[in-house]
Image (cartoon, grey):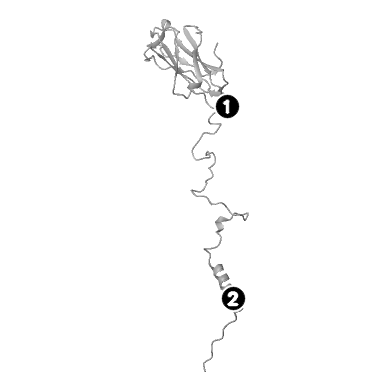
Amino acid sequence: MVDKPRQLPAALLAGTAVLAALLTACGNGGNGPSASATTDTGTTAATTSGPPTQTPAAGEPSGSGATESPTAAGAGAGGGRCHTSELRASLGTDDPGAGQETFPLVLTNTSSRTCTVTGYPGAAFTDASGRQLGPDPARTPGGATPVTLAPGRSVWSGLSFTNPAVSGAKSAKPAWLLITPPNERDSLRVAWTGGAVPVSGTASQASLTVLNPGTGA
């Protein structure tokens, strides 16, 4: 007579199944919570797509592109530099002396914001068709410091040249004077009313001073 296999009690079978499930869960490291998804404080960190955020090196601007800092852009000195479209050019009264003619070239802030100019303007005499007469003015040595222009305020640069009747230089009578603000490409055109200017030969080059506050009057 063959003995029938003894059946284990149902409670023992259930306990064995639970133990096996626990052992399987502990041994499977890929199905548990990711260590990188938890912060040091124990809270779950948000998952983001894309490259990780990098901390800028010392002195490097933050953000996706290189931008000027407020100081570099001149914001600390008065809201950034003045652009040609924000300025009006005018020609002051001649202040002659010892054969020299000196005209103040004036730039006035016509915008509604405060801005800054620094250094020398550009200048060129032209005829009625826009052809330049004579060489570019030279820059008279001087310390260039930022000048803050509130709306309606002005700066000036002295344009000097030797009277051609004194120097013997070849002369011409310009129709226009082009004035270019510092660090700008666009020019402002002013009717020239100062008479003949030297354009070639001895002492034919004019000179410009650094911009200073006021109108030069």
In the image, farthest residue toward the right: 41
Q: Amino acid at mark 2?
A: Ala
Task: Tell me if mark 2 has few (under 14), some (14-19) or many (20+) residues whose alpha carbon lies within 10 angstroms of its own.
Answer: few
Q: Position of residue 139 (x, y in %)?
A: 47, 19
Q: Nearer the viewer, mark 2 or mark 1?
A: 2
- Whether residue 209 appears in this view of the structure is no
Residue situated in front as seen by the camera: 152 or 119: 152
Q: Kindly identify which residue carries mark 1.
A: 77
Q: Dividing the image into 4 quarters, which one contains the C terminus?
A: top right
Instruction: Identify the secondary structure beneath mark 2.
Output: helix
Q: Is residue 67 above or below residue 48?
A: above
Q: Amino acid at mark 1?
A: Ala
Residue for point 56% across, 29% down: 75
Residue for point 49% across, 23% down: 83
Q: Kindly identify which residue carries mark 2.
A: 14
Q: Position of residue 214 (x, y in %)?
A: 56, 15
Q: Position of residue 6 (x, y in %)?
A: 56, 86
In the image, farthest residue toward the top: 165
**Residue 212 badge:** none
Lateral position of residue 207 relative to residue 21, left or right: left
Q: Is residue 180 above or below residue 3?
A: above
